[in-house]
Image (cartoon, rainbow, N blue to C red):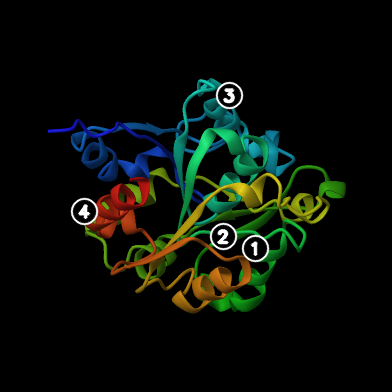
Amino acid sequence: MEEKQQRHFVLVHGACHGAWCWYKLQPLLEAAGHRVTAFDLSASGINPKRLDELRTFPDYTLPLFKVMESIPPDEKVILVGHSLGGINLAFAMEKYPEKILVAIFIAAFMPDTVHRRSYVPEEFLARTPMENFLDTQFASFGRPEDNLTSILLGPQYLKTKLYQLSPPEDVALANSLVRPTSFFVQDLSNRSPFSNETFGSVKRAFIITTKDLTVTQEFQRWEINNTGVAIVKEIDSDHMAMISNPTTLCQYLLEIAK
């Protein structure tokens, strides 16, 4: 039998989370014979940085840049981004397009090459009534001129909007591990759109989480129509597909990575 080619999956977590949220998915991908890199973005998980040390979205994305720098020139990775992690993916696609086989967005913010980089997060915030965030905490941080706002997902929000189909022990885990982060909207709004030549040259796939109460299925479909992708799949899960339905998610990632 012909030996399957080993792929390298780089997993990028979403807001307030860390590498820990991939703990079910990573061993499944590895059991299928593939290499997996899961890491913490700045001021996330066990990363030693504090949020008030960050000013820009690239500051937040720096650990992903370091991972991409470590990829040999003859290797291409599968970039997988969840939720806010889609913006981190876009920055890596802009900077290292030649090192990416495909970028996979899981219920993720997916920018385009027309609007400013803050467009999708701004649309998400504009379309989400504040009361939907329940006990999530928003607070100013950093220098006043940077116009920075932190977000910390609250226990009720996690339980009823993100993890509503996930096991209760995973809700407890999330409650103990989430850290405040930021969308860095002001910084993103000051940056020119991602380019067709770099970001736009990378093959994109999108996995729709059909029971998502955070980034709704309607919003995800709007993103797909706005940007366009090569592959679209649907998974029966809440926002945390890697927690509530890791087996199907693994299967989809392997199919897309072929």
SS for tag 4?
helix
Q: Earlier in the sequence, mark 1 or mark 3?
A: 3
Residue drawn 61% across and 65% down? 227
Q: Is residue 186 above or below residue 18?
A: below
Residue 236 sits in quarter: bottom left
Foreground mark, 1 or 3, reads 3
Q: Earlier in the sequence, mark 2 or mark 4?
A: 2
- Residue 186 lies, in percent from the top left, at 78, 54
- Residue 169 lies, in percent from the top left, at 23, 53
Cα–Cα gap, marks 2 and 1: 7 Å
Q: Residues within 10 Å of mark 4 (few under 14, many from 20)?
A: some
- Residue 27 lies, in percent from the top left, at 23, 37
Q: Nearer the viewer, residue 40 or 148?
A: 40
Amino acid type at mark 3: Glu
Question: For mark 3, what is the residue?
Answer: 69
Question: For mark 1, what is the residue?
Answer: 121
Query: Seen in the image, is 156 located left or right of residue 92?
Result: left
